[in-house]
Amino acid sequence: MSLVALLAWVGLGADGLSSSCYGPEAAFLALGSHTYLSLFVALATVLTIVIICISYTQIIEAFPTGGGGYLVASKLLSPTVGVISGCALIGDYILTIALSVASGADAIFSMLPVEWQMWKLKFSLGLVVFLTLLNLRGAKESVMLWVPVFFVFVLSYTFAIVWAICAHFRELPTIAHGMMADVHTGAADLGWLGLIAVVLRAYSLGAGTYTGIEAVSNGLNTLREPRVQTGKRTMVYMAASLSFVVGGLLLAYLLYHVTPVNGKTLNAVLFEKITVAWPVFASKGFVIAAMASSGALLIIAAQTGFFGGPRVLANMAVDRWMPTRFATLSDRLVTQNGVLLMGGAAFVLLFFTAASVNLLVVLYSINVFITFSLSQLGMVRHWWLERALEPKWKTKIIINGIGLLLTSGILISLCVVKFDEGGWATLLVTGALVGLAFWVKHHYRQTQKKLHRLNELVAAALADDAIVVEKTPPPCDLNARTAVLLVNGFNGLGLHTLLAVVRMFPKVYQNFVFVQVGVLDAGNFKGAAEVENLREHSRTEVNRYINYMSKRGFYAESQVALGTDIVEEAAKLCDDIAEKFPQAQFFAGQLVFKDESIITRWLHNHTVFELQRRLYQNGRAMLILPIQV
């Protein structure tokens, strides 16, 4: 269903708002004994949220059909820069799953006895497995189911922040004095540069707060018309709610002098301090409601990684930056390989970090700010190139320019501050993923060059058609020997297979049946219109084979189907054909590479071997013709 701004805030804002469960805590703990400096961190964080949200509203205007970081960077900068943004996003989505699950487990176990902490890692790993299986099955996104959880979270946190400020209203001047005292003490002990470094480090470690802001621009296709206006209104809701909760929590930590407690999050400690004077049932009820909604919202936020990560992988696979099988849809219409990769990587990450939120926060944020920075750079370039057509280009380029300076500044500081703490691992893995993407692209380009020789057959066949003396095709003889060829478009591979059959079995086959299965993958599963276009394209391509053979005096017909599983659909068509033509013999061509390895076999489609096994089980013979490239 299309979402109005309020529901879009729920559906697309869950990831962003849930980051307040770990972002403010990471920043506050990083200050150590200089807790009053958290006011500077709060102001800087709120300012950053507002600027990023404003700059992303301009991305919404420029990409009204939705534009993730990969698409924006690819279109506005270059495909090469786009792949860097895409790889950073993949890493970010893996960390989104791992950190959201770990933080959700922390929130849930904050309500349980300390001795239960030994089960937290097992619970986190089990939750990742459950979410992976859920997404493999195909989890239908229903925003209405999230509404109660979302608003319990918003109302409980809003109430706690307002209560904390009202209950300590008279103490607010002492907070200002404490901040000044911390500044003077810090400057005396550390020097001004050291003091700035402490604030900058806390600000950087709290950068996980900004993740999820890009979700609205990515999911514009789910919003109600007018989508741009709905998206911009949703960004206002997101900016206001996230700024209030993050800034309010940092202030509340100060007002209640919150300190870490083993087995509890800072938010849990804060809520217990707020409700300490309440009746027992009211105190426990509020804490349980707030922490349970936090855990549930974080688990919902983990779904963002399972939804966004495979989609980025699929888009990159369509462009041949990733193995093409990542664009393949299962019979549940989910990108199965992408879901497995995201779930498996998050599982491994949680296992080796022992589901430690403190460690995962260090690894987090770098990748998302790579995407932020590249998107802002692309928009700056866009407005500069469009300056002759856009009257307000100066205002818009300034907004995205400020966003670029801010996000790139944060990115640099994150890399410096977090490098020795584990940030190097994030950069290394992301760099390796970028290298892998370029290798995959190079492999597919080299393969395409090798296939160029085969595709020359198409031009030769068309030229031959112009001079061939047309013959009248005979009527269909169902009992005549029939060659059934599996093809994928009118191309060199299909023609090479057809000509090989005619050459190897001269005057044997009187009937020719061409079978084509249109594959529904992430590249064309964009709605009913695109599906119908795929069906029409498949018919057009296979009809060219019919015309080619009919002119040469053979009876020819075709069978076309659409589906996500080629083997399943092709096997059904072959069974129908075998019933109609008792003397049917099945043929297919398969590319053979001279330097074939396990990796190259994984990069290419070996559907014909799976189909051969399927037909063999049904008692039907299939001949695979090798075509060396």
Image: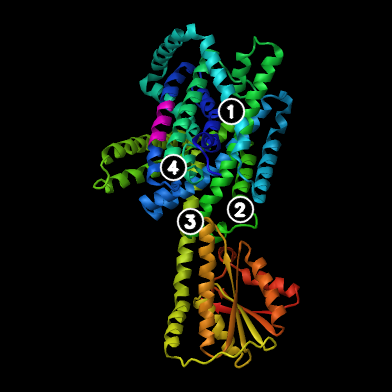
Distance of label 2 from label 3 (alpha carbons): 22 Å
Distance of label 1 from label 4 (alpha carbons): 25 Å
Number of residues whose C-alpha sits closer than 10 Å to that of mark 3, classed few (under 14), some (14–19) or many (20 or more):
many
Distance of label 4 from label 2 (alpha carbons): 28 Å
Per the image, the residue denoted by label 4 is 226
The three-letter code of the residue at mark 3 reads Ala
- Are dots 2 and 3 in contact, CB under 8 Å? no
Q: Secondary structure at mark 4?
A: loop
Which numbered mark, 4 or 2, is in the foreground of this view? 4
Q: Secondary structure at mark 2?
A: loop
Distance of label 1 from label 2 (alpha carbons): 29 Å
- Are dots 1 and 2 in contact, CB under 8 Å? no
The three-letter code of the residue at mark 4 reads Pro
Q: Is residue 306 found inside the magenta-colored segment of the image?
A: no
Per the image, the residue denoted by label 1 is 151
Residue drawn at the location 71% of the way across and 13% of the way down: 280
Instruction: Answer above or below: position of 170 versus 333.
Output: above
Q: Quadrant of residue 283?
A: top right
Per the image, the residue denoted by label 3 is 437
Left or right position of 406 against 126: left
The x, y position of residue 244, in whole percent, is: 48, 24
Indicate the quadrant containing the N terminus: top left, top right, bottom left or bottom right.
Answer: top right
Per the image, the residue denoted by label 2 is 334
The x, y position of residue 139, in whole percent, is: 64, 46
- Are dots 1 and 3 in contact, CB under 8 Å? no
Q: Is residue 46 found inside the magenta-colored segment of the image?
A: yes
Distance of label 1 from label 3 (alpha carbons): 41 Å
The main secondary structure of the magenta stretch is helix
